[in-house]
Image (tube, rainbow, N blue to C red):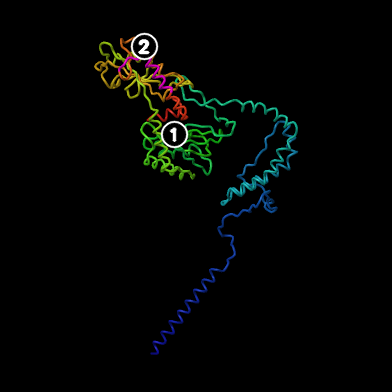
């Protein structure tokens, strides 16, 4: 019994000793220890508050810069510069002080943009005063140079055009901003595109953006375009390496000849945009899927009502023609074989001087690249005009008919319509009347025939 009591008392004493020891350790850990020289602490900087610098901080900033700091040397203008140096010593010292403050703030491990901006603002009055301290001769020299710079800036920039076969006009390094200050338009058009604005937290270069746009080429069967607001020219342009951009806009085409944008294609587009926004640390204003798909269906309905391809046929009056003979005639007339070999294309120069397709020549289902042209034969040549793709100003249907009559006379044939009826003056008038209504319909929609937006809408 006595042994049991002794063990209990020993256990209680041991427990009390443990509690006391733990309390002593806690008290020791909370005790403030003085900083020692060997302590590894991050460098400290003087806080900057408002637009002023504390006197003690200014005294430290006036000390000699570190060896790796390169001192700034003011430019001089001949003899005028020598006189200017003595008059602006005080201002130069103030500017140097403020510049050193900005350098010191930015070089610390925890320097942030706010502190640097405040130091720069504090330096502004001194720099402004130094700029106005120039003597009369330096000011006169600057005014003498000003007209030359203004004349150079006043020259209009050469418009950007597609490269021609004969020559390519050099593009200016920096295009001037529009007079009204508004961004200039580019490929993306709200008439046929679903546009997603993307706001960048900071400016981004084309070299950084382009590697991230691999998924932004097509969404299903719809084209996707990405453009940037260029800093120098305040104009939207396709993202180009070496250029800086303030904002981006990404767009997917709402409809083409493959049909309207559907929900699956919209989801694919949105996923690609979100991935790009995350990679660029940007915010994207995503549209509503239901509304976008409804707009796509409405645009596709309009396109279907205006998608007209007008054909005329040259029918042989005698023996059938070989495909080799048709190829010879088309080549001699300046028509160009398409890449897939199924048709010849007649090109006409547009308003900008660039050759654009006007109509095509087809010889049945002949492929002029794969078939044996000496064995393939037929009695019908079809001239097909894609009405929305050709501008009304060049009178494309008249050109097609004139060429058709020329072929008929040279090849011993006659010109007929799709119903194999000879084309008469009355039929020409009826066709022209229908074409006029179609052109007016496209014009009212804001996409006249042959315009870039019409060519994109009426394509695959």
Considering depth in this image, is 382 or 338 the residue closer to the camera?
A: 382
Label 1 residue SS: loop
Rate crowding at label 1 as few (under 14), some (14 to 19) or many (20 or more) other CA atoms within 10 Å.
many
Q: Is residue 424 left or right of residue 60?
A: left
The location of residue 166, given as percent across then percent down, is 46, 19
Considering depth in this image, is 407 or 53 the residue closer to the camera?
A: 407
- Specify start and end residues of the magenta stretch as a single range: 420-436
Residue 90 lies in quadrant: top right
Considering depth in this image, is 244 or 420 the residue closer to the camera?
A: 420
Residue at position x 50%, y 77% in the image:
20
Label 2, label 1: how far apart the Cα atoms are: 39 Å
The location of residue 264, given as percent across then percent down, is 36, 41
Question: Does 228 sit above or below residue 49?
Answer: above
The quadrant the C terminus occupies is top left
Residue 353 is marked as none
Q: Is residue 200 left or right of residue 375?
A: right
Residue 96 lies in quadrant: top right
Question: Does 422 sit above or below residue 168?
Answer: above
Residue at position x 73%, y 34% in the image:
82
The location of residue 297, given as percent across then percent down, is 39, 36
The location of residue 420, given as percent across then percent down, is 30, 17
The quadrant the N terminus occupies is bottom left
* Location of mark 2 (residue): 406
* Location of mark 1 (residue): 192
Question: Does 108 sit above or below residue 360?
Answer: below
- Mark 2 or mark 1, earlier in chain: 1
Q: Disc 2, disc 1: CB below 8 Å?
A: no
Rate crowding at label 2 as few (under 14), some (14 to 19) or many (20 or more) other CA atoms within 10 Å.
some
Queried whether the magenta region covers residue 283, the answer comes back as no
């Amino acid at each position: 019994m006595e042994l049991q009591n002794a063990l209990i008392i020993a256990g209680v004493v041991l427990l009390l000793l443990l509690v006391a020891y733990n309390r002593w350790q806690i008290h020791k850990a909370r005790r403030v220890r003085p900083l020692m020289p060997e302590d590894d602490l991050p460098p400290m900087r003087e806080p900057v508050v408002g637009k002023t610098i504390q006197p003690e901080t200014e005294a430290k900033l006036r000390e000699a810069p570190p060896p790796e700091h390169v001192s700034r040397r003011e430019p001089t203008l001949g003899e005028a510069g020598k006189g200017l140096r003595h008059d602006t010593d005080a201002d130069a010292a103030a500017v140097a002080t403020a510049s050193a403050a900005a350098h010191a703030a930015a070089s610390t491990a925890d320097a942030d943009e706010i502190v640097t901006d405040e130091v720069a603002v504090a330096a502004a009055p001194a720099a402004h005063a130094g700029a106005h301290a120039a003597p009369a001769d330096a000011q006169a020299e600057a005014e003498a140079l000003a007209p030359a710079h203004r004349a150079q800036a006043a020259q209009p920039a050469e418009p950007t055009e597609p490269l021609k076969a004969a020559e390519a006009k050099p593009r200016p390094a920096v295009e001037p901003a529009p007079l009204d200050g508004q961004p200039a338009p580019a490929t993306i058009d709200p008439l046929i595109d679903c546009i997603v604005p993307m706001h960048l937290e900071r400016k981004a270069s084309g070299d950084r953006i382009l590697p991230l746009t691999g998924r932004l080429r097509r969404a299903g069967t719809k084209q996707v375009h990405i453009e940037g607001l260029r800093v120098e020219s305040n104009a939207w342009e396709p993202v180009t390496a070496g250029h800086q951009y303030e904002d981006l806009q990404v767009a997917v085409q709402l409809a083409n000849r493959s049909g309207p944008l559907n929900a699956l294609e919209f989801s694919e587009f949105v996923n690609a945009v979100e991935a790009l926004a995350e990679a660029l640390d940007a915010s994207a204003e995503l549209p509503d899927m239901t509304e976008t798909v409804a707009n796509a269906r409405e645009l596709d309905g309009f396109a279907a009502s205006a998608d007209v391809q007008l054909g005329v046929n040259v029918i042989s009056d005698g023996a059938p023609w070989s495909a080799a003979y048709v190829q010879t005639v088309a080549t001699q007339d300046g028509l160009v074989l398409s890449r897939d070999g199924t048709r010849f294309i007649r090109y006409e120069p547009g308003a900008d001087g660039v050759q654009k397709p006007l109509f095509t020549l087809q010889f049945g289902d002949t492929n002029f690249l794969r078939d044996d042209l000496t064995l393939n034969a037929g009695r019908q040549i079809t001239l097909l005009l894609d009405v929305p793709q050709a501008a009304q100003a060049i009178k494309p249907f008249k050109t097609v008919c004139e060429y058709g009559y020329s072929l008929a006379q040279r090849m011993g044939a006659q010109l007929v319509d799709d119903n194999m009826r000879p084309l008469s003056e009355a039929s020409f008038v009826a066709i022209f009347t229908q074409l006029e209504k179609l052109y007016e319909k496209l014009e009212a929609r804001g996409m006249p025939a042959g315009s870039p937006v019409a060519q994109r809408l009426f394509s695959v």
